[in-house]
Image (cartoon, helix red, strand yellow):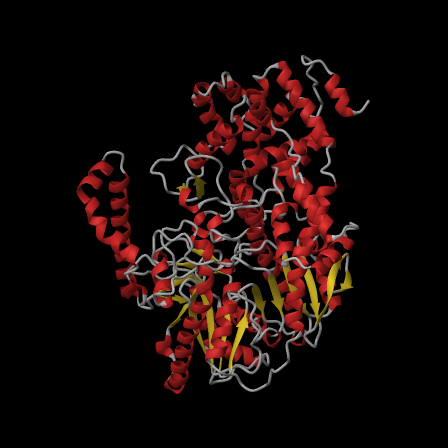
Amino acid sequence: MNAIQAVKDLPASASAVMHIPAEALEKAIATSCVRIAPCWPLKHFVAVNPYFGIADKSFLSAAEWLGQSAGSPLTLAPTEYIEAIDSGRIDDAALTAALKAANIDERTDAVVARLTVMDAELNQAPSMAGLLDETRGWAIESFLVDRISHWAMAHFDEGQADWRPDLGTSIFAAWKTFASIDKTPNIAGLKGLRPLFNALPDDPQQAIAEMATDMGLSADQLEMVFDRLLMSINGWASYARYIAWGFELKGESNDSVMQVLAIRLAWDWALWKTATAEEQHQWAVALAEAQGRENGDWLALLHAVHNAYELSWQTDLVGKLNAQKDDGGDTRPAAQAVFCIDVRSEVYRRALEAAMPGMETIGFAGFFGAAIEYVPLGAEDGALQCPVLLNPGFEIAESSGDADKNEKIIGAKRISEATRAAWYALKMGAISSFAFVETLGLGFASKLITDTLGVTRPGPNPAERGVGKDMADKLAPTLEHYHNATGIPVEERVDLAAGMLGGMTLTSNLARLVVLTGHGSTSVNNPHASGLDCGACGGHAGDSNARVSVMLLNDPEVRAGLAERGQIIPDDTIFVAGLHDTTTDEVVLFDTCGIPDSHRDELKQLKQALKTAGETTRRERAAKLNLRSDVSITEEVLARSNDWSQVRPEWGLAGCAAFIAAPRKRTQNINLDGRAFLHNYDAEADSEKAILELIMTAPMVVASWINLQYYASTVDNVTFGCGDKTLHNVVGKVGVLEGHGGDLRTGLSWQSLHDGEKLIHEPMRLNVIIEAPIDAMNKIIAGHDHVRHLLDHGWVHLFHMDGDGKVAKKYAGGGEWAEF
């Protein structure tokens, strides 16, 4: 007799009490909690790989896990692949190769026939709430998610609400207090839950142990049940994981996700306690069945077809790269411009190189190696301007350079902040809000009109300065220690500058003008605006990083220190900071008044080239934005950046599919359609392969996070995306709900992926192409588990480019490479 039959044969009145070893419980909790990916709040919303916690599983086994825990697919629907085959997007050669690799011996017509009738039903594990939905015929699980969310949006509020509950207790204990007085379940017909919640221990791990034992869970069922419950509130669990992430970066531990698990388990336990014996028995049988259930061969076929979908695009990309001719020379560039590796930069870089003959563009992560916390003047804390994988190394203060001016600006800021606070209190107050609308409502008519027509237009992150433009123009970062900000100690500046130049491949043949161009995005009425800013700068615009880096590299003492090491910056090389607005494709340069007269003509030429490049880039992006042809494209792009009703101010990183680390000459003059992260890398100059290791462990990983966030939001927007933008409601400045209830939504909106008629983002795993020795890459893969998991388990495709710029080999896992 098997285990499933044994459970079925138990009488409905029987309740098996299982002893759960403490070690098994702790392991199951830890494993399930770490499978949740973090979700950053709106103020610095950055792309996160939602599959981060299951990267140690192969792509196919992860699909099995997602089906069981979340009822979530890891591919598009079968009908999407049928359309791709019919249209030629999946070509016959790629499909034949993918089927052969999966040991599936079928012809194209047979595959299409199977896809047409495929029953792609995912075998999701049961929850007690979900089972009661079926037996009682109403949405109990949706109801309890609403109740948890209602509590969580108040508990985790970051300043939106005027009043917050007492946060002196733990997450679980605070929820218990709320749940024990919440009468909503009673009104909804769920009687007797409040006393049960109140009787639970305050310690979440003890509570989990008691509830799991009471429900008769066996040690080998724990992970399945915990995974299922956490994924049912993935949004708030992900936010709890973000809280834990901050502690982990400091080498500390945090149990926020476990506490959220305890809350969700408490609901299923209370429902189980108040269920009938028959319902309890049905749940035990459903759990046993879920443990032994398999998806069958349809999942393997679907994944083989998806591999063909990716292989078709890979073949096209590799063909373009292999057809490239090496026209690079050693003449001194007319100018150099370093851009973030962001895929949006690829379009602008091509346009700039065409607008200014002799211009060399370079790709590097947009924080330029300056991992800083940028503290605005008068503030106590600042923004973390670095990738979320890093801790900032320095605190950089903002200053006008004059103490009296600083005090005046701080005073103006305080008045502005106090005025805004009073205005907000008047507008949002329980009683004053009515008078506000009646008395002052019409005063907003002019603003509505100007916003709608795009008459006024902010720049990227306009609120970060907190002062008017005139005052903001007086402010700049300082490298010195200022108030509580550390600055960059003199003895560390040369090391930092040397690392920057090496990473940006700017160790020789520097131009007279070198522009470090950060990027940000302009949009209004957009809760996820920071998600369009620079991910390498922690979800902020990169102007402060560019300005700090330029100040460092223009410093005569830093240059003297570099020269002592044999790293010469020519005396006539001037570094300039800039900011690329990815919505409008305008580039503004900072602090140009300090550029000497000897470089004025070149500066003028550069500014004209930047303007021309912006116009060219806007024309190229216009087709995907479906811009009207009867108006100026430039005017329409500028207007949409200030249109409060615009759901697609820009496409962001939609379409991202490749990461190429190689000299620029390998990709120059190739139209990559804004789909490739381009990182300059010179293997010959990297004798110790330290830069290669940095690229493979940081920018490549971050690019995969971005790529997989877009992937997951496309194939399953319900679980990993944030739905329809027009229905969003901001909660606690933490995130959004879609409508008035439900779980906290993570990921990207449907409007960021689809234009209303077709997908703009094709869900494909990142294709990484690196010009570097295979043995060096193998050594790095073997030495870093998180990189090895991504590559060995098929979350990222890695290709080798040889010293002649040809791509012929693909990483096959386990340190092995195959011909491509």
Left or right? Give the position of 654 relative to 319. left
Residue 638 x/y as whole percent: 35, 63
Residue at far left of view: 439
Q: Is residue 589 above or below residue 452?
A: below
Residue 223, quarter of the rendered image:
top right
Considering depth in this image, is 758 or 593 the residue closer to the camera?
758
| Quarter of the figure that contains the C terminus | bottom right
Residue shown at 29%/55% (left/top)? 451
Considering depth in this image, is 589 or 625 the residue closer to the camera?
625
Residue 764 x/y as whole percent: 62, 55
Left or right? Give the position of 402 relative to 553. left
Residue 150, quarter of the rendered image:
top left
> Residue 745, can we see it?
yes
> Residue 377, can we see it?
no
Residue 544 x/y as whole percent: 43, 64
Residue shown at 50%/69% (left/top)? 347
Considering depth in this image, is 561 or 808 the residue closer to the camera?
808
| Quarter of the figure that contains the N terminus | top right
